[in-house]
Image (tube, rainbow, N blue to C red):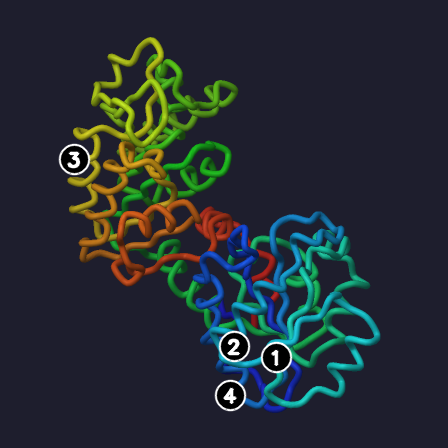
């Protein structure tokens, strides 16, 4: 797969439309709470500006569903970016208009503009052809640096590429370079750690790696559904009763492929959720009454750690417990420590996974690659074609 990259683009004095994923948390004071996603695209932004280009930034923020929602305007994001760059960022109150087009036509090299929340426009998510053309008319070149939305066939990620010379930003290029080896020829043993709550988002990943993975370690609410499907009593634990048949099918498939499909053998339980609750470490077979499974147990964490230690490639998506509360962090902490100290190739993805390791005190550079895309990373590893990447193929 060859995608056209930033170093192939003629940026000199051009108007560059840059799609980023600045969907960041905003606190109740209206300020950016975590600017990680903005920082990730700074190398691309600086490289564009180095060529005396005019920069026009497009991002979405939350899910306004094609209507203007004042609380979802991107003003705080523009201010945060200006602070990081120490440059003025002119933020438009609309996405496209004749006035915006005229202002951009008169713009000077090195100026930075930000369009309003791209998802205020109903044609964005439907990839409307007219809206794609209008967007394209604002610039000379399109750069996509939003790996987090590369699995969306939207106007600002896909449609615009039909009308302008289009290239991958440095972040998107780095993501593809980091994930490609996992599909092509990963070093073995390959271990996948899967947590989180919902089975639907992980089915295709598990199935795609049946022939590739040596171990699939399952935790989180996801494990509860598999445990219930295997006939265990999960009492008051979070699980998906309507997905039990799917879970049974996956376990049968795992047996056929000789996978080491590892479910927790013990767990941390409590009758309620909080910071000062009483917890017990019990074997899965002893779950009863009002117990809730809220983390993998000590024995399971040790078994996971032993498998991770022998692995040469590790993919982790989804926390293994309710990590927001200290009593239920130990399973994720034990696994994070082993992954962080592994000499193998380690890839983390998904917002909750990244938030989890950050809360537990780990730094990004302790892992080979930390993906900025949860859904996009999953779909890429499932072997699906990502529209935002396909649009950039050379």
Q: Around disc 1, counting alpha carbons within 10 Å, would you say few (fewer than 14), some (14 to 19), or many (20 or more)?
A: many
Mark 3, mark 2: which one is toward the viewer? 2
Label 1 secondary element: strand
First along the sequence among labels 1 and 3: 1
Q: CA distance from mark 3 to mark 2?
A: 43 Å
Residue 309: image location, x then y, percent: 16, 46
Q: Which mark is residue 50?
A: 4
Q: CA distance from mark 4 to mark 3?
A: 50 Å
Say whether residue 183 is left or right of residue 116: left
Q: Around disc 3, counting alpha carbons within 10 Å, would you say few (fewer than 14), some (14 to 19), or many (20 or more)?
A: some
Mark 4, mark 3: which one is toward the viewer? 4
- State the residue at coordinates (32%, 48%): 359
- State the residue at coordinates (49%, 75%): 44
Q: CA distance from mark 1 to mark 4?
A: 12 Å
Q: Residue furthest front?
A: 29
Label 4 secondary element: loop
Q: Which residue is mark 2?
A: 45
Q: Which mark is residue 262?
A: none
- In this view, the residue in front, 252 or 304, is 304
Which quarter of the rendering shows the C terminus?
bottom right
């Amino acid at each position: 797969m060859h995608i056209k990259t930033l170093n192939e683009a003629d940026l000199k004095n051009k108007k560059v439309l840059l799609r980023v994923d600045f969907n960041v948390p905003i606190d109740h004071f209206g300020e950016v709470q975590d600017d990680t996603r903005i920082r990730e695209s700074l190398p691309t932004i600086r490289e564009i500006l180095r060529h005396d280009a005019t920069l026009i930034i497009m991002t979405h923020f939350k899910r306004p569903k094609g209507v203007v929602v004042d609380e979802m305007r991107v003003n705080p994001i523009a201010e945060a970016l200006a602070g990081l760059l120490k440059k003025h960022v002119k933020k438009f109150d609309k996405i496209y208009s004749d006035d915006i087009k005229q202002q951009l036509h008169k713009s000077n090299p090195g100026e930075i503009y930000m369009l309003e929340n791209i998802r205020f426009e109903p044609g964005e998510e439907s990839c409307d052809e007219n809206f794609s053309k209008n967007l394209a008319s604002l610039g000379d070149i399109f750069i996509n640096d939003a790996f987090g939305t590369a699995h969306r066939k939207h106007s600002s990620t896909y449609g615009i590429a039909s009308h302008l010379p289009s290239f991958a930003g440095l972040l998107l290029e780095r993501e593809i370079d980091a994930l490609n080896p996992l599909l092509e020829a990963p070093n073995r043993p390959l271990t996948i750690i899967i947590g989180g709550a919902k089975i639907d988002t992980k089915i295709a990943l598990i199935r795609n790696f049946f022939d590739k993975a040596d171990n699939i370690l399952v935790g989180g609410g996801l494990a509860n559904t598999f445990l219930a499907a295997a006939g265990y009593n999960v009492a008051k634990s979070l699980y998906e009763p309507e997905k039990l048949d799917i879970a049974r099918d996956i376990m049968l498939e795992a047996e056929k492929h000789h996978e080491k499909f590892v479910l927790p053998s013990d767990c941390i339980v409590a009758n309620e959720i909080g910071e000062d609750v009483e917890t017990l470490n019990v074997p899965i077979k002893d779950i009863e009454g009002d117990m809730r499974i809220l983390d993998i147990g000590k024995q399971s964490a040790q078994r996971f750690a032993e498998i991770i230690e022998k692995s040469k490639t590790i993919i982790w998506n989804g926390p293994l417990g309710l990590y927001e509360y200290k009593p239920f962090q130990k399973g994720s902490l034990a696994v994070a420590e082993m992954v962080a100290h592994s000499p193998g190739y380690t890839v983390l993805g998904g917002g909750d996974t990244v938030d989890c390791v950050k809360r537990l005190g780990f730094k990004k550079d302790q892992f080979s690659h930390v993906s900025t895309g949860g859904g996009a990373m999953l779909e890429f590893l499932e072997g699906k074609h990502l529209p935002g990447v396909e649009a950039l193929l050379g």
